[in-house]
Image (cartoon, rainbow, N blue to C red):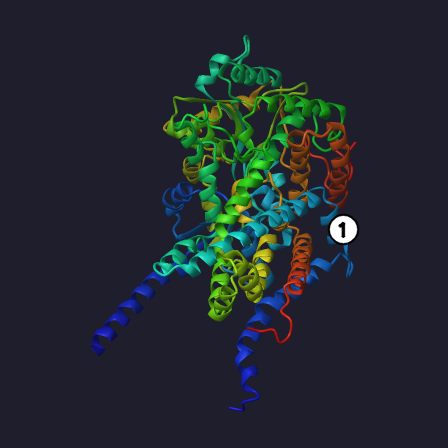
Amino acid sequence: MKSLNALASAVAAAAFVASSAPLSADVLFWSTQARPVEEAQAMREQVLSGFEGGVDYQPNEDGPWLTRLNAELEAGSGSIDVLGALHGNFSAMNPDALTDLGGLGVSSSSETFNGLAKLGTDTLQYVPWMQASYIMAASKEALQYLPEGADINALSYDQLIAWAKAVHEETGDAKFGFPAGPKGLKHRFFQGYLYPSYTNGVVRTFASDEAVVAWEKFRELWQHTNPASTNFSFMQEQLLNGDAWIVFDHTSRLAQAFNERPDDFVAFPAPAGPTGRGFMPVLAGLAIPSTAPDPEAAKALVAYMLKPETQIATLRATNFFPVVDAELPDDLPPSVKASGAAVAKMSAAPDANPGLLPAGLGDKGGDFNRVFVDSFERIILGGQDIRRVLDDQKGRLAAIMEETGAPCWAPDAPSDGACPVE
Amino acid sequence: MNARLLPYVLILPVTLFLCLFFLYPFVLVAAQAFGGSDGLSLDNFRDVVSYWKFPISLKNTMLLAALVVPVQLALALLMATMVNRMKKGRDLVLYIWTIPLGISDLAAGIIWLAIFEQSGFLNSMMTGLGLAEGPVNFLSYQNPGLVFLAIALAEIWRATAIMLVILVAGIGLIPKEYYEAAEVFGASPWQRFLRVTLPMLRPSLQTALILRVVLAFEVFAVVAALGGTLLPVLMGEIYAYQFDLQNGGAAAAMALIVLGISIVFTLIILRVLRVPKGATI
């Protein structure tokens, strides 16, 4: 009996050593991206398996992601080597908490992205990692109701409303879908699509007369929007179950629909308003916290992630597009083909009016989003007067801009100092 | 061991535990809430109270507590008296009734979401029985009342058992003699319940109500699952401050407000249901 026990504990000890030894050498990749199980698995098996040192890929919700990171930074020592997150996550951090990456020799091929990644300093604080955008998608059943003369690749907001109205009247159900749920990315629609398309600005024009028109148009569209939209966060689900036929969302939140039933759906560019076709690129980046236990391995991993082959593998795994020049192969998943074509059409449209991600807001990014979400809840859900709500929210927006001193970003006209709310 | 010291030694571990995991974090949270750019300030409180959603979330939380707690109290009393009368299968019934207690509140929210959703069980049942033509969307911004009711229902289902177990224990402690005496004097079952059970149950009622009311002010996961952002409650706002806005100061201030409300209600319940000195069972 005694020897059996000894044997058992020896086996247990051996198993423990065997399981813990490689773990301790792995580079801990702490990410807010590629969170769904399939995506995380694809990241591990198809993207990171090629890295020599071994990587422990751990995706997390924004809250826990930040909590652990902050705890390590405050403690002055940590186990996270590489951070993967959206531009907004990094811009909310103190640049001192991140290792300068200017000397690493890798960067994105887009100067706009590299500029954003400096976070207001003069060197890269994170390296642009991958990009995406928001597009429109529709079920093919909806196409028969397209208004006459409308080109799906060059829709206007009026045509979109007419289309959604026609579907509503013909089928009896409001089939436009909008990601207004708690985890939905509705604020990006207002910041990068509605406002640039109607007011040619976001901050300066927040409470302008054009903005009132924009909200009136959105209210019209809302008449034909599935009222359950306030619970929708990933529009691929509603496309697949038929609750919504025409939707707006992030490309990676539509991917499943295209991959499961590629022949049933079409992707197309966002509509245009009086001041152009507003759209917003999304940018994710890689950074190294100042507390990284193995900065050299971390830098090697960042460099590895920026290789063209890795970028293509990342595209397959996450539906986020490369930020470096990489030749796209022909055998990409249907979602990548569909959304890639829609993004290309959108950015190449003659009336394209890109609205950049908010920059320079520091940790007020959430408050900035809240101004738009609150306006939506009050105007659209609460039915309050548009002018009154905008004048009220304007004060909050102005306070955020003054506190952070963030200069205007496109499409707002540049400013000296803080971007004014006019 | 010195008999005079023994009680203190015995409560020492709990005291240490509470100091470490309650008092110390509480001091930190308070410091965060009252901390401003320059020393002590009430800025955080001013910020959160002046936010347009604050009155709405306060009202929702209060209304929810006001609806849920009395219903649960009545249900728990009824269930406790029933269990107490049972000769056979008492334990089995108790086990079954307390199952919801073992389920996390988020899971409970998701269970009820599966019922009320547009493509949920209730809708399929109604269409199946021919009561509705197509799926009805219950949980939409157009019917805030229904959202509220669904949340209240889920809360009642989930947390009645916590009052039940306390009351069952309390009823078990009431000596049989009182009931026998009451019967001798011709008291009806209803009179026995009102004049014997309820007064003798005071200490248990106190505990059960305090626990339940405090928990009601902390309602969060069920609301998040069923209502999303449609029905703002205090706890949801705290979460939004902490994680969406990364504004720890404001979240701490809100947390202190919830704590304040909880303390006020605890004191009220303690006062109203106090057991006069010397009137023990």
Point out residue B127 in the picture as x, y percentages from the top left corner: 42, 27
- Image mark 1: chain: B
**Residue that appears at 65% across and 58% down:** B262
State which quadrant residue A7 falls in.
bottom left
Whether residue A43 sits left or right of residue A127 in the image: it is left
Point out residue A181 in the picture as x, y percentages from the top left corner: 55, 36
Q: How many numbered discs?
A: 1
Depth check: B151 or A168 in front?
A: B151
Secondary structure beneath dot 1 equals helix
In this rendering, the answer to whether B223 lies above or below A11 is: above
Whether residue A285 is visible = no
Depth check: A308 or A9 in front?
A: A9
In this rendering, the answer to whether B259 lies above or below B148 is: below
Q: Quadrant of the C terminus of chain B?
A: bottom right
Whether residue B160 sits left or right of residue A192 in the image: it is left
Depth check: B200 or A239 in front?
A: B200
Whether residue A145 sits left or right of residue A47 in the image: it is right
Decide: few, some or many residues near mark 1? Use Cα within 10 Å; few <14, some 14-19, many ≥20: few
From the image, tell me which residue sits under label 1. Answer: B46
Depth check: A19 or B60 in front?
A: B60
Point out residue A124 in the picture as x, y percentages from the top left corner: 60, 45
Q: Residue furthest top?
A: A148
In this rendering, the answer to whether A120 lies above or below A11 is: above
Whether residue B61 sits left or right of residue A83 in the image: it is right
Q: Residue furthest front?
A: B185
Give the residue type that dot 1 points to: Arg
Point out residue A330 in the picture as x, y percentages from the top left corner: 38, 27
Whether residue A270 is visible = yes
